[in-house]
Image (spheres, coloured by chain):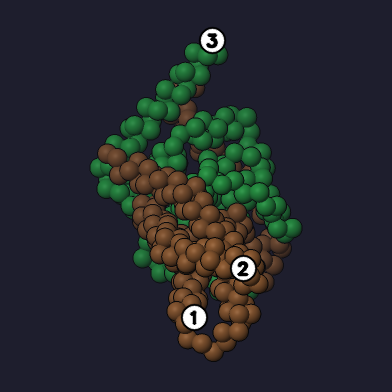
Amino acid sequence: MTEMHTVEQLWRRDVERLVRVDERAMHSRVAGGAWGVAGTARTHQSGLEVSGGVLLAGFIAAIAIFKAGAGQRGSASWEWYLVVLGCAVAVALLLTRRRHTVAVLNVGDESVRAMLLECDRTLGRQISNWKTLVWWYCLPIEAPLLFALLRSGGSSRGLWMSLSLLIAIAIVVTGWYFARQMLEPQRRDARRLLSEIDEP
Amino acid sequence: MDERAETVSRWLEEYRRLIYKVVMVYAADAHAQEDLFQEIAIALWRSSEKFNGLSQESTWIYRVALNTAIDVARREQRAPRTIELHEDAHWVALDEPDEEQAWLYARMRQLGLIDRSVLLLYLDGNRYEDIAEVLGISKGNVGAKISRVKERLKTFLENEEEDAS
């Protein structure tokens, strides 16, 4: 079986009998518009991103509860601006996710190389978003929270601060894990495939 | 059935051999094959509105199928899916290939993701121009890749013969 023409003959062997399409089920899926089932079921990756968004929302809510509990309702302290900024980051994350999903699902209208380039760009955006969230948002909040927690000692405010800090740490750990362990290796793979396809 | 659904159904019917081969070259076990077939069908459905007839249908479907297969294979290598398929997943069934074909598909799966697509397009009798269009590379690069992939496949086969003897 070392001759290429043997391989070619084998490849061209009729495979019609090998595929049976269940027409009724297929048409049902088409008519029902339920084609997104497998496409939207990328749960492993999506789960991490969504959990990040949920954690962020929880963090923002914890700050709001903490402030309400501390009787500062209506005040316009710097923390409220951070809450607004947090909401903006959360929305940006969700929009990025949506754009990423669309890019993955519309893989048919471009060449393999263009798809890999788009994949590299999308992963780059996601990594950048996570790093922005972790380094420029969560950590600057955590530091004053930690400082305030230490200063407050065992006061009633300490409980809310601890909760807020815990959530912020969870976001940082999730973001760090997701960016370093999931997205960056994927990006390296995409770049490896790109260099493979460009290799003369 | 609307026009879009009819188009996709026709594609799945007319080009099922093409899709089948892509599936067999990129997915090893029956579960993964069925999953990939579904993914390709979904990608065809989603991209069908963008098909404007500027490229040949077969070129378009190669792009959809290969992009989807490479994308799925790339992600699966890093994060294998742990979910169960949707209960309607068994809407298409792929029979087992015969022994010799299974052997060929298995050898092709030993190649890299890009090399597999090059060999698949070549074995399907596509012109260099068409392969270049699907992959997004130059015609000269296609020629070089085909030579290299043939050599790799030949090495695989020779090593296998040596092991057997």
For disc 2, the marked residue is A158
For disc 1, the marked residue is A80
Looking at the image, the residue that sits furthest to the right is: B87
Same chain shared by disc 2 and disc 1: yes
**In the rendered image, what is the letter of the chain coloured green?**
B
Picture quarter with the N terminus of chain B: bottom right
| Subunit bearing disc 1 | A
> Residue B140: in sight, yes or no?
yes
Question: Would residue B24 appear left or right of B126 to someone viewing this image?
Answer: right
Q: In whole angstroms, how far apart are the C-alphas of marks 1 and 3?
A: 76 Å
| Subunit bearing disc 3 | B
Quadrant in the rendering for residue B123: top left
Q: In whole angstroms, how far apart are the C-alphas of marks 2 and 3?
A: 75 Å
Q: Which residue is drawn at 33% across and 32% down?
A: B147
SS for callout 1? helix
| Residue A134 position within the rendered picture, expressed as x and y whole percent measured from the top left | 45, 60
Front-lying residue, A14 or A102: A102
Label pair 2/1, CB-CB below 8 angstroms: no
Front-lying residue, A110 or B125: A110
**In the rendered image, what is the letter of the chain coloured brown?**
A
Amino acid of disc 2? Gly
Amino acid of disc 1? Trp
In the image, residue B44 above or below residue B112: below
Question: Would residue A168 appear left or right of A31 to someone viewing this image?
Answer: left
Q: Which numbered disc, 1 or 3, marks the residue closer to the eye?
A: 1
